[in-house]
């Protein structure tokens, strides 16, 4: 069982940046594909980005491509989401997730979730 704790959310003006972190417990972090998802009020949870076990491969939702960057530090059991050029429509609770058993961009595929961190982008 892996436990995930997100941090780094907050309030930022449009055009600003934030870096989210997700710290994982346990010794098997490097074995997990990791993902970031978000859920805006009244909307379903959606895929944001995912990263392979080694960090060598990444994949992004079209809505964040070129603005967000996912990375990981396996020595620190942490995955990051650098968010630049933020827009009001990026406002959501952001979740990290681990160990998908199916498609890496599929919410239902992930077996472990953090509690989420709020990101609010003001216009």
Image (spheres, rainbow, N blue to C red):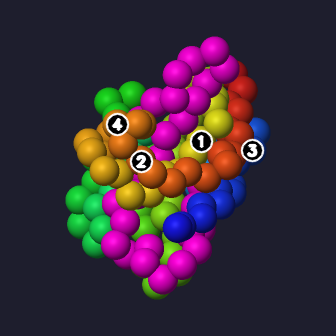
Residue 10 point in image, percent of width and height: 74, 44
Q: What number is the disc on residue 106?
A: 4
Q: What number is the disc on residue 10?
A: 3
Residue 78 point in image, percent of width and height: 52, 70
Residue 36 point in image, percent of width and height: 47, 47
Q: Label 2 belongs to which residue?
A: 110
Give the magenta part as a residue range: 20-47
Q: Label 1 belongs to which residue?
A: 94
Q: Image quarter for residue 15? A: top right
| Observer able to see residue 23 | yes
Which quarter of the image is occupied by the C terminus? top right
* Discs 3/1, front: 1
Q: Image quarter for residue 12? A: top right
Left or right, 27 with reference to 89: left
- Mark 2 in CB contact with mark 4 (< 8 angstroms): yes
Q: CA distance from mark 2 to mark 1?
A: 15 Å
Left or right, 34 with reference to 79: left
Q: CA distance from mark 4 to mark 1?
A: 15 Å
Q: Image quarter for residue 21? A: bottom right
Residue displayed at 66% across by 46% down? 116
Structural crowding at the residue carrying mark 4, measured as other residues with C-alpha within 10 Å and reported as few (<14), some (14–19) or many (≥20): some
């Amino acid at each position: 069982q892996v436990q995930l704790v997100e941090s780094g959310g907050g309030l930022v003006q449009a055009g600003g940046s934030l870096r989210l972190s997700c710290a994982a417990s346990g010794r098997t972090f490097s074995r997990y594909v990791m993902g970031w998802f978000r859920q805006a009020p009244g909307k379903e949870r959606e895929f944001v980005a995912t990263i392979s076990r080694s960090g060598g491969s990444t994949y992004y939702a079209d809505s964040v491509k070129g603005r967000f960057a996912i990375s990981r530090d396996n020595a620190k059991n942490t995955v990051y989401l650098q968010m630049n050029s933020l827009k009001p429509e990026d406002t959501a609770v952001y979740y990290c997730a681990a160990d998908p058993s199916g498609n890496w961009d599929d919410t239902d595929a992930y077996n472990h979730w953090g509690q989420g961190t709020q990101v609010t982008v003001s216009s």
